[in-house]
Amino acid sequence: MRILHTMLRVTDLQKSISFYTELMGMRLLRRKDYPEGKFTLAFLGYGDESETTALELTHNWDITSYELGTAYGHIAIEVDDVYEACDSIKTKGGQVVREAGPMKGGNSILAFVKDPDGYMIELLDRKRLD
């Protein structure tokens, strides 16, 4: 068994695809419109879906906003250097909401960014995970 994908509902599909490809370094793996259901699915990731987990973005054509809820936490992405990743994301117009630095009470180096819909993404430094 393995996790195939995580799904997020997004309000502006192109803006979200741009965020995850241009700022987070993912590739658009596949995209399909479902006119009868009035939605589009886009799958993004860092590798082939047969080997790695993907992120599914669901765009319901008639929905303009969502409530994120209080149960959602974050998506965690491992990066080579959290400080450099934050600098790159800010340079490209992304929103860093917790600057890179040590985790409180631990040794992990982490940061948090928000995607265009307000979903939190944790960046974890590959070199310093606890």
Image: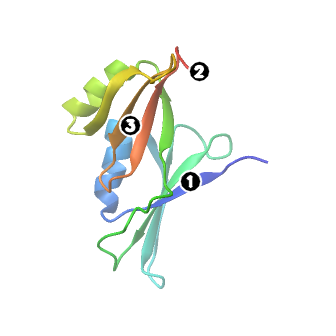
The Cα–Cα distance between marks 1 and 2, rounded to whole angstroms, is 24 Å
- Give the camera-side residue of 33 and 114: 114
Residue 113 on image: x %, y % = 34, 39
Color theme of the render: rainbow
Name the residue that disc number 3 marks. Answer: 24
Q: How dense is the environment of label 3, judged by Cα within 10 Å: few (below 14), some, or many (20 and up)?
A: many
Quarter that holds the C terminus: top right
Q: Amino acid at mark 3?
A: Met
Query: In the structure shown, which secondary structural element does the residue marked by tag 2 occupy?
Result: loop
Q: CA distance from mark 3 to mark 1?
A: 16 Å
Circle 3 — which element?
loop
The residue lying furthest to the front in this view is 105
Residue 45 at x, y percent in the picture: 51, 43
Give the residue at mark 1: 6
Residue 69 picture quarter: bottom left
Few, some or many C-alpha atoms within 10 Å of disc 1 (few <14, some 14-19, many ≥20)?
few
Q: Position of residue 88 (x, y in %)?
A: 27, 27
- Say above or below: 111 vs 114: above
Please tell me which residue is depicted at 20% across the width and 30% down the height of the picture: 91
Above or below for 39 versus 14:
below
The mark nearer the N terminus, 3 or 2, is 3
Q: Earlier in the sequence, mark 3 or mark 1?
A: 1
Looking at the image, residue 64 sits to the left or right of residue 58; the answer is left
**51 displayed left or right of 40:** right
The label on residue 130 is 2
Q: Earlier in the sequence, mark 1 or mark 2?
A: 1
Amino acid type for the residue under numbered disc 2: Asp
- Mark 1, secondary structure of its residue: strand
Distance between mark 3 and mark 2 Cα atoms: 22 Å
